[in-house]
Image (spheres, rainbow, N blue to C red):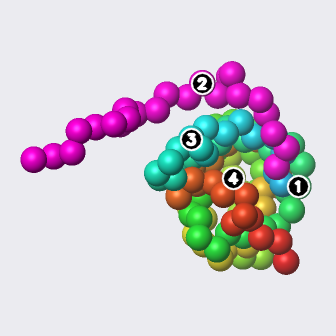
């Protein structure tokens, strides 16, 4: 016999109602960071300057580029990026965004500010 469900198995977020927060890449609107399961989170990120190089020890990030163009620095190499492209950044990869663009960032597990490391 299965356990009764005590909380919904879905969460709805409205990123338009979320206040933008500064981050190393620009401004971000975050959803699902307070989910108790910490499965993943979603960030709508406006990159407007060269970010600080950083890495994560536990978290994988998927960047999907919605608009604009620029470059991604990944472990010291620069790669051009534009709308419609995606990058998966695995734990330990030093990275930063350079340019002016908007991305969806999906951190897995959910974003944890304690897992943001700078050299």
**What residue is rendered at 63% in x and 54% in y?**
111
Closer to the eye: label 3 or 1: 3
User: Within the image, what quadrant is residue 114 found in?
Assistant: bottom right
Q: Give the range drawn in magenta.
A: 1-23
Residue 48 position in % (x across, y down): 86, 43
Residue 76 position in % (x across, y down): 77, 76
**Membership of 25 in magenta stretch:** no
Q: In which quarter of the image is the C terminus?
A: bottom right
111 relative position to 2: left or right: right
- The residue at which mark 1 appears reads as 50
58 relative position to 116: left or right: left
- The residue at which mark 3 appears reads as 32
Which numbered tag is attached to residue 14? 2
**Membership of 20 in magenta stretch:** yes
Closer to the eye: label 4 or 2: 2
Which element carries disc 4, helix, strand or loop? strand
Q: Toward the viewer: 101 or 18?
A: 18
Question: Could you tell which of marks 1 and 4 lies nearer the N-terminus?
Answer: 1
Counting other residues with Cα less than 10 Å from the Cα at mark 2, is it few (<14), some (14-19), or many (20 or more)?
few
Label 4 and label 2: CA atoms lie apart by 27 Å
Question: Could you tell which of marks 4 and 2 lies nearer the N-terminus?
Answer: 2
Which element carries disc 1, helix, strand or loop? loop
Residue 87 position in % (x across, y down): 59, 58
Closer to the eye: label 4 or 3: 3
CB of mark 3 within 8 Å of CB of mark 1?
Answer: no
Closer to the eye: label 1 or 4: 1
Outermost residue to the right: 49
Label 4 and label 3: CA atoms lie apart by 26 Å
CB of mark 2 within 8 Å of CB of mark 3?
Answer: no
Question: Could you tell which of marks 3 and 1 lies nearer the N-terminus?
Answer: 3
């Amino acid at each position: 016999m299965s356990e009764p469900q005590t909380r919904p198995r879905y969460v709805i977020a409205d990123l338009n109602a979320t206040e933008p927060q500064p981050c190393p890449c620009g401004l971000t609107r975050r959803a699902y960071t307070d989910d108790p399961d910490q499965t993943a989170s979603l960030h709508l990120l406006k990159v407007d300057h060269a970010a600080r190089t950083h890495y994560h020890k536990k978290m994988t990030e998927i960047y999907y580029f919605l608009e604009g163009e620029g470059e991604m620095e990944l472990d010291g190499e620069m790669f051009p990026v534009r709308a419609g492209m995606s990058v998966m950044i695995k734990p330990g990869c030093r990275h930063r965004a350079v340019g002016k663009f908007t991305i969806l960032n999906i951190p897995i597990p959910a974003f944890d500010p304690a897992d943001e490391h700078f050299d």
